[in-house]
Amino acid sequence: MNEYSPNLAVIKKVRKETHDTNTYTLEFSDKKLQKSFSPAPGQFMMLSLFGIGESAISLSGTSNNGSVTTTIRNVGSVTNAVLRLKEGDFIGMRGPYGNGWPLERAEGKNVLIVVGGMGIVPLRGVVNYIKNNRKKFGDLEIIYGARTPDDMLFRYEFEKWKQIKNTRLDLTVDELPIETTSKCKIGLVTSCFPSMKTHHKNAIVLVCGPEIMMRYAAKCLETIGFKDQQIYLSLERRMKCGIGKCGHCQIGLKYVCKDGPVFNYADIKPFIHPL
Ligand SMILES: Cc1cc2nc3c(=O)[nH]c(=O)nc-3n(C[C@H](O)[C@H](O)[C@H](O)COP(=O)(O)OP(=O)(O)OC[C@H]3O[C@@H](n4cnc5c(N)ncnc54)[C@H](O)[C@@H]3O)c2cc1C
Ligand code: FES
């Protein structure tokens, strides 16, 4: 079998998230594959549009019947073409690839999720996983920052997230448009740290967002007692093969596609965005 061959998937549902981002529910045409498909939160797929190209895309959710959701922002050729697709259209997908979040290591610990912008996409699966396995984890705290309230993804789920036992959700934005009714506070995600409840003792931190934001978040967490080994980041690099062959995503001695995209901060610190 050619490992670069995509599997066909049909778009069952399109949900508008923001002005430039949609969530797609997808089902594989191959029903056997559909049944056995069980990606871990934080893994990614190579999504293809025939005649246009491929892009690495996280999974924002999975369901028991094997359908998956992806949440895609229009930034360039492939993602722009995806945003023009409708229910019933087909795309190609291969994967899942990468390691995913260290959920086993997080068991028994308090979990702090720090996300900026699209970073919430690969962590939505973690929130759902903790909800479905609540007893295995300690407290859950989610700090989510976006440009404006209208740029926040999965807003329709926030109330449900807050109702997960021992869970706190803290939202912050860069700016509040005058006409908004949102009560979000203004500030970077790091501005939420002084009021956060998660203590560094017996905690694990999962961070995803723009690299500069992750770097600042990790640095601030260090100053309040978190150790590098407690912090995990999901990195984004331009990907081609997605399976450790082409070298496009190399960072130091690692391949983001194969060894990541989730890395322990202690291992990756020298190679990421300098402050
Ligand atoms: C592991 C992983 C998971 C991802 N998950 C998602 C997701 O769930 N949803 C989503 O919308 N996007 C996700 N992305 C980002 C997505 O892969 C890129 O936005 C996409 O490849 C852009 O393709 P394009 O053809 O639309 O844009 P292009 O036309 O190729 O590029 C548009 C612009 O974006 C820049 N660019 C493209 N890809 C990247 C990249 N990987 N890193 C930095 N700059 C880039 C280009 O330099 C250019 O300036 C993920 C990336 C990785 C590596
Ligand atoms: S994308 Fe080819 S080695 Fe990672």
Image: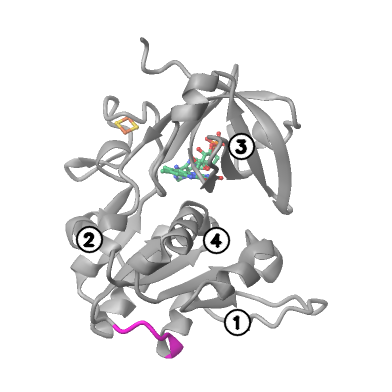
Residue 149 lies, with reference to residue 196, above or below; the image says: above
Residue 127 locus on image (x, y percent): 48, 61
Marks 1 and 3 close (CB-CB < 8 Å) = no
What count of labels does the image hold? 4
Q: Position of residue 196 (x, y in %)?
A: 43, 85
Q: Residue at x 42, y 37 (%)?
A: 38
Question: Is label 4 in a helix, a strand or a loop?
Answer: helix
- What residue sits right under mark 4 in the picture? 117
- Numbered badge on residue 273: none
Please name the predominant secondary structure of the magenta segment in the image: loop
Check the image and report above or below for 263 versus 203: above
CA gap between label 1 and label 4 equals: 14 Å
> Which SS class for mark 3?
helix
| Marks 4 and 3, how far apart at CA | 16 Å
Q: Which residue is mark 3?
A: 79
- Residue at 71% over, 25% down: 89
Q: Which residue is mark 2?
A: 269
Q: Nearer the N terminus, badge 2 or badge 3?
A: 3
Residue projecting furthest to the front: 135
- Report the residue at 44% width, 15% height from top: 5
Is tag 1's residue or tag 4's residue first in the polypeptide sequence?
Answer: 4
Q: Amino acid at mark 4?
A: Gly
Give the quarter the ligand 2 occupies. top left
Disc 1 marks a residue whose amino acid type is Ile
Q: Nearer the viewer, residue 136 or 115?
A: 136
